[in-house]
Image (spheres, helix red, strand yellow):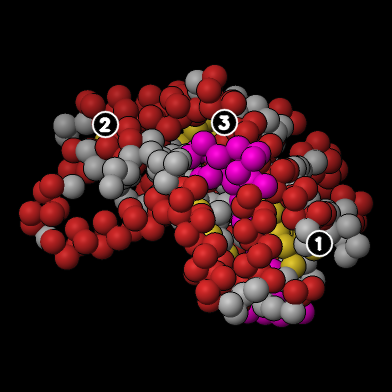
Amino acid sequence: MSAIQAQDPTVYEILRGEMKRQSEGLEMIPSENYVSPAVLEAMGSIFTNKYSEGYPEKRYYGGQHFVDQIENLAIDRAKKLFNAEHVNVQPYSGSPANSAVYFALLNYKDTVMGLKLDQGGHITHGLPISFSGKFYNFVPYFVDKDTQRIDMAEVRRIALECKPKLLVAGYTAYPRDIDWAGFKAICDEVGAIAMADISHTAGLIAGKQLKNPFDFGFDVVTTTTHKTMRGPRSAIIMCKEKYAKAIDKAVFPGLQGGPHDHTTCAKAICFGEALKPEFQAYAAQIIKNSKTLAEELNKLGWKLVTGGTDNHLLLADMTPFGIKGMEAEDALDFAGITLNKNTVPYDPRGPFDPSGIRFGTPAATTRGLKEPEMRKVATWMNKVVRNHTDKELLAGVKEEIKQMCLKFPVPGISL
């Protein structure tokens, strides 16, 4: 960062502070990860200088020869990763990607089904105050109160009753695998478009550890490219060929202008990394780590949503400890473990002051942490939550975490 240091020392010091924070602490937010040095370089590459409205070979500006090459490369690699018929790599992020699918395939006030936000769904899956809830008639489905898992019989009952035009499966805070076959069967029965949002689990699917919704006949699949994909903060839309034209028009010129070519370049690199055999080992280790973390926390008396996990994330109810999710988040952050407060199913508290916390293993796994380290993390988390007001104890835990983290460098950071 020599150029930044010379030109803007204030920004340089802020960046150095964030590098230190990431290096000395544990990033346990399941939607975060560390990208490779190659992805970092691509994000700062000269493709940021280019403007490229349109699609390969169909641009509104000149000088697109190399932009077309990089976009086509990203598309081809994504198709291979996910067995997709058509891929649009231009969406800026996950929410814009989902909005483009709705814009392409729905009319105003059409009926759609999605998991309720406080049960594990995303804001774009029908939150009343978001565009999804305002523009479309979203009918929510829920998890079972006892098992905290999706009850497919209840999903079917709701679908038969409301007859959605589109059904969204895939979540932001659900720690279990998804019954893609069951959802597709329901969609076929009611004549709905089957859409999967795999933003959280895409890397586990690309890494062949979880099932691919396309293998069960899904029509549209959206995903971010960070989280378990370990790429830039962006998104893609994949679909059957019959929806390709409508979705491409919805992305551009329907909802976006020119794509971010430097991000497209980073996506191409990210997909290339995910095609390598070592990425499958990485994806497998993410799940091993999260399962180990769940097992240890269960032994320590934690109340985990669904009792455990099948993927990269866990949810825990803090109520048995007599504290709120926000208090747990603050105490853990002070001790060097970064995660987020989160609602738990049927949470009596509101979304801005929920009962639970959400955490996961993608970033820690990227650094090289494995099962032995996860057992230590569980012990530290338990100690912090049970002693959340003891600043001296929290400071001691923070130093222990720092010493461990310095043995596992963050890719692309050199202090």
Q: What is the total number of numbered labels drawn onto the structure image? A: 3
Residue 123, how many percent across, how many down? Answer: 59, 64
Q: Which mark is first along the chain, 2 or 1?
A: 2
Judged from this view, the residue extending furthest toward the top is 277
In the foreground, 59 or 46 = 46
Residue 276 visible in rendering: yes
Boundaries of the magenta span? 348-375
Q: CA distance from mark 3 to mark 1?
A: 29 Å
Residue 177, how many percent across, how many down? Answer: 75, 42
Three-letter amino acid code of the residue under disc 2:
Val
The residue to which callout 3 is attached is: 282
In the foreground, 70 or 208 = 208
The residue to which callout 1 is attached is: 301
On screen, residue 257 above or below 90:
below
Residue in the image at 52% along x and 74% along y: 392
Name the image quarter holding residue 386: bottom right
Sort mark 2 into few (<14), some (14-19) or many (20+) by Cα contacts within 10 Å: many
Q: Secondary structure at mark 2?
A: helix
Three-letter amino acid code of the residue under disc 3:
Tyr
Q: Which mark is first along the chain, 2 or 3?
A: 2
In the foreground, 201 or 9 = 9
Residue 302, how many percent across, how many down? Answer: 78, 62
On screen, residue 144 above or below 56:
below
Q: Which mark is first along the chain, 1 or 3?
A: 3
Residue in the image at 46% along x and 50% along y: 403
Residue 48, how many percent across, how many down? Answer: 22, 43
